[in-house]
Amino acid sequence: MQASSTASEWAYLEGSGQLCRVLERHAVWGNTVCQVWLPASGKVLRVRESQLQPLDGSESGAAPHEITYAAAAARIADALERDTLVAPLEGTLIPLPHQIHALSRAISGDQVRFLLADEVGLGKTIEAGLIMKELKIRGLVRRTLVVAPTGLVTQWVQEMRNRFDEDFRLVIPGNFAALRQITGLGEQDNLWRLHDQVVCPLDSVKPLESRRGWSREQVARYNRERLEDLVTAGWDLIIVDEAHRMGGSSEQVARYQLGEALSQASPYLLLLSATPHQGKTDAFRRILSFLDPAAFPDDGSVRQDRVAPYVIRTEKRRAITAEGRPLFKPREVRLLPVEWGSEHHEHRALYEAVTEYVREGYNQAMREKQTAVGFLMILMQRLLTSSTRAIRTALERRLEVLDLPEGQLSFFGEDIGLEWAGLDSEEQLEAVLKARLKGLRSERSEVEL
């Protein structure tokens, strides 16, 4: 028997189609037996030389980059057969244990429709990216839509590119007219089909019931181009960030209607929210119904045993590093007294004056049942502890409203309406300041002071 080493030779193993590397050849009684290594499984086998097929290409074998590609493909195929997660091996990040858990649970079943509800700072965006990447590798997803608040859309594009090497196109529906001119596409062409991976602002695609000065035809065209074309564009996966904003105060709210339409527009759906419940069972039930309307027909169906299969959540106190250490230090809250110094007499006078304005204004608003004005008072107090500039700007804007003629004022701003519960604190402040809320008795003189 004679043995010879051919360490750099690669071939395909007949019958399995797997790439293998020939380690040794042995001549035994006129037959040649080869010892080969299968990179996909890590196994070393003995096979007859006749079972090996040379790689296509030059007689000296495939180029190094071809071998690397084939070996990687073989490993991925083997991993998928074993139901191994491949996405964590891609990209530039090393996922944390709770992120791996979220990916594993999301991929464990056939229905990938979940609410990712980790606390703030635990990386829900990364979890969604991992799930998307895994579904793409498995050939289950090609077209992905991300719907996010306006302030987060650019961050989504950057995160997907930097962490997952995925190119998403930021689409602003307000630019559709210019886009049609550039591309030469007509009114009946669906612009949402131009790109397979899209990020768009949430409020830019919610349905519109009416708009001052618009005809019914203009409103219908607006809704068709922004919402109807969006949901019929053939998405495989839809991701909604800050999904609690779609719960709304009723099923008539535009954001809820958008959420319901998106939930029916793709087989796979990921809703992201650190605060999905917010103390309102009805709004929480509406969010859960996006995932499975049959499971949550009414508020009574929102029970822990029913909710648990649809929610993936990690709390900060339970999050750990790869080494098993707590990811965050325990939070300690203490009240520290801050004394006014002699150099702070102007700040103190401002603080006391605004506090008195807020106290009197809130009590009067409650007596007169002007809820929005009462809420404005609370926001004023919050701004006071933020910065002098912030409270000054807010008071100046309020004074501008109070200078308007009586006929242009209202008890409750038209920009607030039914979607109030779906706004965060900053949006609520902006909505109240923009609203033409009717002033309280002697409020103007108080603000001027």
Image (cartoon, rainbow, N blue to C red):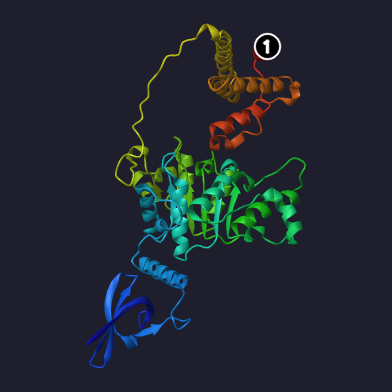
Give the farthest residue toward the top.
342
Q: Position of residue 368 (x, y in %)?
A: 60, 18
Can residue 293 be seen from the camera position used here? Answer: no
Quarter of the picture containing the N terminus is bottom left
Relative depth, front residue between 46 and 443: 46
Q: Is residue 146 left or right of residue 66?
A: right
Mark 1 burial class by Cα count in 10 Å: few <14, some 14-19, many 20+: few
> Residue placed at 51% from the left, 56% from the top?
165
From the viewer's perspective, is residue 344 above or below residue 407? above
Q: Position of residue 229 (x, y in %)?
A: 64, 57
Please state which amino acid type lies under the numbered disc 1: Ser
Quarter of the picture containing the C terminus is top right
Can residue 8 be seen from the camera position used here? Answer: yes
Judging by the rendered image, the residue that carries numbered circle 1 is 445
Q: Quadrant of residue 211?
A: top right
Q: Is residue 101 left or right of residue 390?
A: left
From the viewer's perspective, is residue 9 above or below residue 273? below
The tally of labels here is 1
Q: Is residue 284 left or right of residue 319?
A: right
Q: Position of residue 266 (x, y in %)?
A: 52, 58
